[in-house]
Amino acid sequence: MRIDKQHAPFKLNSMPESKKIMGIDPGTNIMGYAVIKITGNNISVMSLGVIQLQKVDDHYTRLQKIYEKISFQMEAWQPDEMAIEAPFFGKNVQAMLKLGRAQGVAIAAAMMHNISVQEYAPRKIKQAITGNGNANKAQVATMLKQQLKLDTLPKYFDATDALGVALCHYLQSSNPLARLNNKFGRKTGSKKSNNWKAFIEANPDKVK
């Protein structure tokens, strides 16, 4: 698969490079993951899927499954870096806590495999992929299908969300200005949404 520069809403780094990036869309019900490989300006999707946890009733057992499944993907594909969607902040403390734990377990798996981690706010990911920080999941998936020349899209948007996280990380790391902003904690693009109710309505399968 090759990025179509003519229609891409972003500029790719022309410097040759080769690395693998894992993207994670955290969730305690369904967790999305993706692994991409970059060689020059070519991007290959190596792994794309979800971890389904609906049948696991115990929350702590779910965390164990997340660690095991994410570790398996890391050992299988040997990513150099991991990018993960940052959690929202809202009034539903229990839901926030569970989602934060799921994210933390995925980060811990990366640390145990000596893989560097970078977090990205949902709006930043959408902005990087579609040029619109308010894009919905279907729009993100459609843009990824077009840009990465995917034959089909997976059943769950959690998988394409994870793919978007990985591609966002590549685009940010390929942009010197973005790297500088990240280093000094500067914000780019739209402000991060903290509307937890809207997040839950848009992601009913994220938290249980």
Image (tube, grey):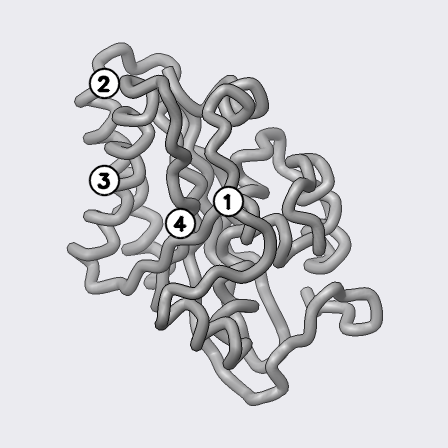
Position of 35 relative to 179 (above/below): above
In the image, 91 versus 5, the foreground residue is 91
Q: Residue furthest bottom?
A: 15
Quadrant in the rendering for residue 161: top right
Residue to which mark 4 is pinned: 84
- Mark 2 to mark 1 CA distance (whole Å): 28 Å
- Mark 3 to mark 1 CA distance (whole Å): 23 Å
**Amino acid at the residue labelled 2:** His
**Amino acid at the residue labelled 1:** Lys
**Amino acid at the residue labelled 3:** Val
- Residue 59 tag number: 2
- Residue 192 tag number: 1
Residue to which mark 3 is pinned: 105
Q: Earlier in the sequence, mark 4 or mark 2?
A: 2
Crowd tier of the residue under label 1, counting other residues whose Cα lies within 10 Å: few below 14, some 14–19, many 20 or above: some
Give the percent coordinates (x, y) of residue 99. Answer: 33, 29
In the image, 153 versus 84, the foreground residue is 84
Q: Earlier in the sequence, mark 3 or mark 2?
A: 2
**Badge 1 element:** loop
Q: Are marks 2 and 1 in contact (CB under 8 Å)?
A: no
- Mark 3 to mark 2 CA distance (whole Å): 12 Å
Q: Is 62 situated left or right of 43 in this image?
A: left
Give the percent coordinates (x, y) of residue 141. Answer: 68, 43
Q: Earlier in the sequence, mark 1 or mark 4?
A: 4
Q: Quadrant of the C terminus?
A: top left
